[in-house]
Image (tube, coloured by chain):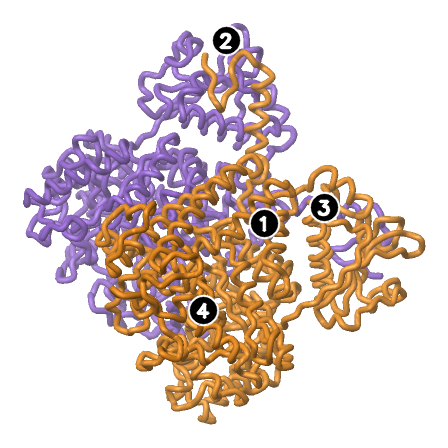
Chain colours: A orange, B purple
Amino acid sequence: MHSDAFFPPRTLLPFSVLLFSAFLFAAAAAKAEDGYDLWLRYQPLEQETRHQYRPQLRQLLIPGREQSPALNTIASELVRGVGGLLERAPAVSEHIRGDGFVLVATPQSSPLVRAEKLPLKGLGDEGYLIRSVKIRGHQGTVITANSERGLLYGGFHFLRLLQTRTSIAEVDISGQPRIGLRLLNHWDNLDRTVERGYAGQSIWDWWNLPDVLDPRYTDYARANAAIGINGTVLNNVNASADSLTPRYLAKAAALAEVFRPYGIRVYLSARFSAPVEIGGLTTADPKDPEVQRWWQGKADEIYRLIPDFGGFLVKANSEGQPGPQDYGRSHAEGANLLARALKPRGGVVMWRAFVYQQDNPEDRAKQAYSDFVPLDGQFDDNVIVQVKNGPIDFQPREPFHPMFGAMAKTPLMMEFQITKEYLGFASHLAYLGPMYEEVLKADTFARGAGSTVTRVVDGSLYGHRLTGIAGVANIGSDRDWSGSTFNQANWYVFGRMAWNPDLSAEEVARDWLKITFSNNPTLLDIGLEMMLASRQAVVDYMTPLGLAHLMATGHHYGPGPWVSDLARPEWNPAYYHRADRNGIGFDRTGDGSNAVAQYAAPVAARFASRSGVGDDLLLWFHHLPWDYPVASGRDLWGELVYRYDRGVATAQNLQDQWHSLENHIDPERFDKTARLLAVQAREAKWWRDASVAYFQSVSGRRLPAGSAQPSHSLEYYQQQQFPWAPGH
Amino acid sequence: MHSDAFFPPRTLLPFSVLLFSAFLFAAAAAKAEDGYDLWLRYQPLEQETRHQYRPQLRQLLIPGREQSPALNTIASELVRGVGGLLERAPAVSEHIRGDGFVLVATPQSSPLVRAEKLPLKGLGDEGYLIRSVKIRGHQGTVITANSERGLLYGGFHFLRLLQTRTSIAEVDISGQPRIGLRLLNHWDNLDRTVERGYAGQSIWDWWNLPDVLDPRYTDYARANAAIGINGTVLNNVNASADSLTPRYLAKAAALAEVFRPYGIRVYLSARFSAPVEIGGLTTADPKDPEVQRWWQGKADEIYRLIPDFGGFLVKANSEGQPGPQDYGRSHAEGANLLARALKPRGGVVMWRAFVYQQDNPEDRAKQAYSDFVPLDGQFDDNVIVQVKNGPIDFQPREPFHPMFGAMAKTPLMMEFQITKEYLGFASHLAYLGPMYEEVLKADTFARGAGSTVTRVVDGSLYGHRLTGIAGVANIGSDRDWSGSTFNQANWYVFGRMAWNPDLSAEEVARDWLKITFSNNPTLLDIGLEMMLASRQAVVDYMTPLGLAHLMATGHHYGPGPWVSDLARPEWNPAYYHRADRNGIGFDRTGDGSNAVAQYAAPVAARFASRSGVGDDLLLWFHHLPWDYPVASGRDLWGELVYRYDRGVATAQNLQDQWHSLENHIDPERFDKTARLLAVQAREAKWWRDASVAYFQSVSGRRLPAGSAQPSHSLEYYQQQQFPWAPGH
């Protein structure tokens, strides 16, 4: 008889056989690590840690919970979280009975908290305080706030302390969000497809709403509340007017009701032409009184169903969407039309600045600024203009958008993309924390040094109270929500940085790794290295040196730098790289499109300087000869190929690093991630090979010594077709 | 202080508070009953039952498992199943050590089994025997078969005995399938939409295959093997030729590899024009030698990747699909083209008979028969013609298809629909067991009395060895696979009846209820009543008295009996009901389309008789005046309204019955089902009201006394629009 890996050899029977049975049974009975729990994965901490925490977590007191769904929600999350992490649920009590209590209350709901006179004044409506206290001789922890929402965030922060194995023995933490509107944007359609979605279909089962409420809606709210997200735009910015019909408003209202105890408001993308399409009017002109009345009536109707409705997100006069310019009106006039309808109930309009015109010969990177900056001061005070992080479109790397800092009288809201339309879909590991950080920390110099994008977005630069940040969600019906475990980190870091833009990508990644996997130092070290290297790798193998928009048409899957025959010039990769026999890059200096002039003078000067701009953005701003010497000492051609090769090498290294962690990760998540990293390594090489083959054909240059020839001919790469690519 | 339902009153502290905490924690930690486990839900049996079984299930012996993925699969399923059901996993042993062994082996793999000389001769390749035995003085159970596949089915049958609390003390059971090809047909597209799918998107994540293998693929195979399904057609009959490209064949091959240990073969829908679309040929003419060579090459390519590939399913010259008639060739010539390519490797062609022509004025119910019966004898021996259960299209009730029994020389395969395109989508409870049973037990009289449809399909009537039954799957990415718990029963009963068409819908329903919920007698009684009443209810509130095809256009959601303006006559509900001031119904007697003549004489005579046909099919075959007296004593108009009312009443009763079971069902499944039953009751009334309003407007008759007026005007119902209805 022979043994194999699965069945133990006979000589060890019967003990090993029993072990085997027990193993099989345990494997079947144990919960598979399918990623569903996200950062609410309350699996038991290491034994020693559990034992340390337990005496500090004997009792939970949440006065007033009987009357409040929100407090009830906090109680249930804390019992669930502490119970899971410590394998022992705290007693929910009415009175402090000894050391180890956790008291969750506002000064209003608890005389004990009130007596402590804790400093809550500056914490606003969403902030909280977590502090070790001694009450009536007993040692414990107080989580307090000015509001139930604050308690909710404090409760989740407290759970995070446990999840990250932080001591709660002498704790004194206060937190409050730096930004008011912390929103997910779902580009989800009513047929459950998701534009640029790579993780299954929409989690909104519109058809069965409001009758059926998927338990997933609650878990979505929990996951978002845990990271501070306080609003969600349910439907695609390329909106159907049907979303505003009574039938669909009832569905949105059902979701709003699920989300409410978690402090999450519902918003809708509004189609500007809705008065015509579902209102029976002949125009959507913002100056038409009937149109104004229609929107007012619609807003009233919405607020009857959703009393805390957040407002509208609008994509207007952009990529074929209707808008005020169809009637000769400005973006401001269009935005104000909707804003006035929402104003009486406190709703806001988020008006997107992502515009570029088919018939506009101006550099696409300049058009949004040109359209919007002249309107500064014309927007109503409940309008916020939503600006993508860069001037083109969510590329792996862009300079910050020139509108940040350029509109003193208008609140500007950041729009990040969490889904990776241009960074390898759901399959590539690309931790976006460093990208968000790079943009947020960029200095606009709009009011001198220190005028960071963060200070534009948090309102402090120009003193705006209406502030916001949006992330285009990477959430779908896949069991793990985001198509891969590492993609979850992008949702997570977006939420954490939306709350506190000063956080570093690294510290958030470390928290996430601890919560998602374990506290193992090897895992944390290598995991962190992988995450922090990953986005630059994608830049390197897709769009190095400031190149952009080199992907295939439509679905955006894979390389297409050769594409130059599309109807609109700015849809073509060739428009962006401008490569020929002599050189490559888009001249945006004064000799070219002069896009640099849209930035404040110090920034403009830096971007306009070949040596000052930095090689990471070199070809975004400059058209240069192939033999131009870059900082590394290589010539431009050599540096281009070097960076492609570096990207491929990093992608391959990610695989090796992951495999070194096999003993530290559960089999289910290990295997799926390993398979995806193999896809990434393969596709990185494909991007590099196809791009190098193309640029070689244009430049006529030989590959640097040691750099491998592409595996196939350029024609081969050009012939690849992917009619069923997702997200399109 | 006040108590509420969730938090216990203070006076009971601290005991109840601890209980509450424990409850919250247990609720969080326990596996939610989300329906994912289907009939593989190995939750612990009642304590007494567990104790009875345990002494009989101490040891599991599966010799040879080290060398065989299939046996390994059986071992793991039995350990998991028994371990879960009895809360104690059996020891996996090499030798019998006492009473209570379960020995799973073929006579070849075990001398002990061989020595028992059990009667395996007639059990074929998939049959099995489960028998209580005494070996070397020890009492135990043997599961044996001629093949590993037989052991697999025997193993699942054994688990079913436990799940249904059947005694295994003195067991002697043999089983073998009556039908060879027991297949699911997935109408799944490469973009992950599912035609007529109402349970999310396709479970095939084509984009990420073959790199990523969702654990769900394995669970799909387990669930199917458990009910005897042995093949699956992965892609929609409205096929894309891309499914046959190397890229997509590699994806199909990856699925085939997952399914293989479970005895499940992969099949593909083939697009007849593939030689043109992906082969670069200018024709797909079956007589063209290049076309023949192309299909042979394609078959070779497939078998290199999938050595046990099952074959092709083809929808040709039907609803716009390409086919041999495009080249003046017959269905037989088309089918044989593909059959000859597959023949050397044992593949089959399943050629669908669902055809009707735009320019054919013949009664649509007659066209398939007219096209196919003259071809009897012309099909190669590895072709089987796949015929829908009725002559139109999966209506709530149709007579059996006249082709059954009419083609002595051609194997005919049954095509049932499991997804409920015409029976309320995923939301209505309609247990299809009684419908399958009604069709299978129908007597064609083709070779005299007893020539049932079952005997056509199982091959016994005309001595065919190639036999098959297909079910159009109701499976999607929803967590519960089928959109509701009760929909799972339709997948289940399809599999069970495909294995044994003599099973009654009732006994299968009883098994399913026990496995899915519990052994509670109240639950079983009421659950069974609900299931058995449900399909007739749908018939009553949608298409009573033999009416058919009265649904709205395109998506088929809701009533549309008034529709009469579609391009093709047979697309219009009015074509089918033919209602006017004087009467209603489709005359298919000799005075009308004479469709009755397609049936064998005794059946034809019965169908042609107004009094003999039975009221359930009355208007399918007869056009009758509104005052025609039916069997109940009512006139036709009164009976029509009566049946609509009866359907609504039953739908409402289903709700009441379900609510009476609240204490017997877990909260998660109880709540979702309750919500869906509310939808069904509402939509039943909508169907009834809209249909009655319409037929009233046509007949000009008053409602019978006691029957309520529709809630809205006919115009209201006609104006309802559902542009986002799923599955279309």
Residues packed near mark 4 inside 10 Å, few (<14), some (14 to 19) or many (20 plus): many
- In what element is the residue under mark 4? loop
Given the current orientation, which residue lies at the most extreme right position? Answer: A137
Q: Label 1, secondary structure: give it.
A: loop
Q: Residue at x 70, y 63 (%)?
A: A69
- The percent position of residue A320, horizontal first and vertical second, equals 35, 77
Residue indicated by mark 1:
A37
- Dot 3 corresponds to which residue? A83
Q: Secondary structure at mark 3?
A: helix
* A355 vs B283: above or below: below
- The quarter of the rendered structure image containing the C terminus of chain B is bottom left
Residue A717 badge: none
Judge the density around disc 2: few (<14), some (14-19), many (≥20) Cα neighbours within 10 Å. Answer: some
Report helix, strand or loop for mark 2.
strand
Residue marked by disc 2: B135
In the image, farthest residue toward the top: B136
User: CA gap, disc 3 to disc 4?
Assistant: 38 Å
